[in-house]
Image: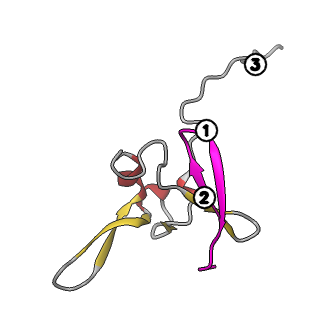
């Protein structure tokens, strides 16, 4: 038997960063990553002071936030440096993360 292996794959969003690798991801659900929170975006209750963070799914579907291209994506690499991802130019900028 022979199997046919595709030679030209077309995968949408292949070069986009993944939320599971972002420093702003706060895991709040073991069921699915979609309901976890993004610590970069949210809203503060002006009466109680409580901050409610947006879900990663809502952030990635809203171009005013991360959007499909992950505009706000930041990843920590093995050297404890934060890596900012610039999807438009595909340039990675490194800088020290003093919080780690």
Question: 1 or 36, which is in the foreground?
Answer: 36
Label pair 1/3, CB-CB below 8 angstroms: no
Question: Which residue, given by chain and number where applicable, does mark 2 sit on?
Answer: 21
Question: Could you tell whether 2 is left or right of 39 in the image?
Answer: right
Q: Which mark is residue 15?
A: 1
N-terminal of the two: label 3 or label 2? 3
Task: Please report the residue visible at 61 percent of the width from the left and 23 percent of the height from the top.
Answer: 10
| Mark-to-mark CA distance, 1 and 3 | 22 Å
Task: Indicate which disc residue 5 carries.
Answer: 3
Q: Residues within 10 Å of mark 3 (few under 14, many from 20)?
A: few
Q: Which stretch appears magenta?
A: 82-100
**What is the crowding at mark 2: few (fewer than 14 residues within 10 Å), some, or many (at least 20)?**
few
Residue positioned most to the right: 1
Q: Is residue 40 visible?
A: yes
Q: Residue at x 48, y 42 (%)?
A: 69
Disc 1/disc 2 C-alpha distance (Å): 13 Å
Q: Is 47 situated left or right of 24 in this image?
A: left
Look at the image and say whether residue 45 sits in the magenta stretch: no
Q: Circle 1: is it few (<14), some (14-19), or many (20+) Cα within 10 Å?
A: few
Closer-to-camera residue (55/3):
55
Residue 85 on image: x %, y %: 58, 51
- Of tags 1 and 3, the one toward the viewer is 1
């Amino acid at each position: 038997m022979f199997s046919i292996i595709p030679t030209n794959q077309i995968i949408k969003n292949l070069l986009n960063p993944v939320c599971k690798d972002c420093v702003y991801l706060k895991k709040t659900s073991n069921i699915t990553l979609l309901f976890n929170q993004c610590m970069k975006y949210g809203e503060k209750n002006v009466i109680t002071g409580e901050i409610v963070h947006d879900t990663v799914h809502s952030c990635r579907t809203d171009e005013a936030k991360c959007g499909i291209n992950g505009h706000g994506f930041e990843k920590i690499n093995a050297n404890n440096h934060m890596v900012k991802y610039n999807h438009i130019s595909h340039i990675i900028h490194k800088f020290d993360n003093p919080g780690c």
